[in-house]
Image (spheres, grey):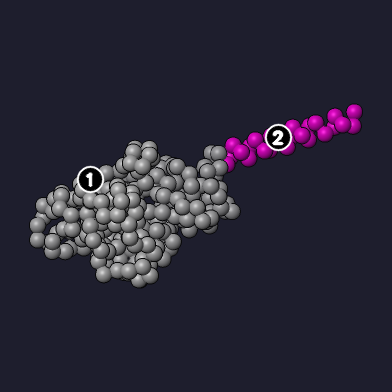
Amino acid sequence: MKRHSFFPLFLLLCAVMLLEIHLYSRAGLQKLNRESIRSDWFRALETGEEMTAYLKELKPEERGEAAGLFLLNQGSGRDWDSRASAWKSRPSWSAFEKASSAVWQDVQYFPVPRSSSKESRTVSFQDTWMAERTYGGNRGHEGTDLIASEDTPGLYPVVSMTDGTVVSKGWLEKGGWRLGILAPSGGYFYYAHLDSYGDVEEGDQVRAGEILGFMGNSGYGPEGTTGMFVTHLHLGIYLYPDGVETSVNPYWILRMVEEKKLSCSF
């Protein structure tokens, strides 16, 4: 009989645990853990039109928190704001907010300037995140392609979207002539398929808006291969939580700074 006296207590504990799980689920808090940064829903960065317009108006240092809270709530309007204190109380919040800020905080300019000499020289881009790619094996597209309206390698300048340090420069089979910039908040911005470089070397400090090189069609073969596709810039953005390379979707970041274009004569 004595053992049976624990049964009601056991039921009560189970009920409390189920209630806690239900409350966390309703608040979306079950999404926030150390793996959240590598989750599909975070990496897609799908802020949408309304939220992206809102992020444009914020101070750079406020964007990461706002975008992170929005994604945690899976785009349920502006309700994310009312749940902020609950999310911030979670042990994983600090690392999550840091990763979100690394994506959004340092971006200042669109990577391809506006042509001041010929208005028809523009670029276009679409959200092709994880679209199928087959060169080198089936894989998802981990970036956004900015397509030149005039298919002429070496014509369109590419500028750094952020301040940062040049940490990689040179040839990659899939990326062609590429350059990688590590921004102050920890985001790695990858510019690929270049035709040529500006006056930059590994280890250099660059400023947002500085010319990194010129759009091309290099890559998909041994060093020096060109012409396998149209002139375009592949932009990738990467994070390194716990030292693990994690790609995120640049599309909505580009939309945020689509009007922040420098003007250049080309």
Residue displayed at 11% across by 52% down? 120
Q: Quadrant of residue 77?
A: top left
In x, y percent, where is residue 176? 30, 53
Residue displayed at 26% across by 55% down? 224
The amino acid type, in three-letter code, at marker 1 is Phe
Q: Is residue 180 above or below residue 32?
A: below
In x, y percent, where is residue 57? 32, 57
Residue farthest front in this picture: 222
Quadrant in which the N terminus is drawn: top right
* Residue 11, magenta (yes or no): yes
Please report whichever mark, 1 or 2, sits nearer to the chain's N-terminal start.
2
Residue displayed at 73% across by 35% down? 12
Report, in whole angstroms, how far the alpha carbon at label 1 lies from the one at label 2: 60 Å
Tell me if residue 227 can be seen: yes
Name the residue tied to disc 1: 229
Q: Quadrant of residue 181?
A: bottom left
Count residues near mark 1 (Cα–Cα under 10 Å), then give few for <14, some for 14-19, many for 20+: few
The magenta region covers 1-24
In x, y percent, where is residue 41? 44, 42
Residue farthest left in this picture: 118
Q: 58 or 157, which is in the foreground?
A: 157
Disc 2, SS: helix
Q: Are the residues tagged 1 and 2 within 8 Å (C-beta)?
A: no
* Residue 153, magenta (yes or no): no
Tell me if residue 252 can be seen: no
Would you say 177 lies left or right of 264 here?
right
Residue displayed at 35% across by 71% down? 204
Count residues near mark 2 (Cα–Cα under 10 Å), then give few for <14, some for 14-19, many for 20+: few
Q: 212 or 86, which is in the foreground?
A: 212
Would you say 31 lies left or right of 116 here?
right
Quadrant in which the C terminus is drawn: bottom left
Name the residue tied to disc 2: 14
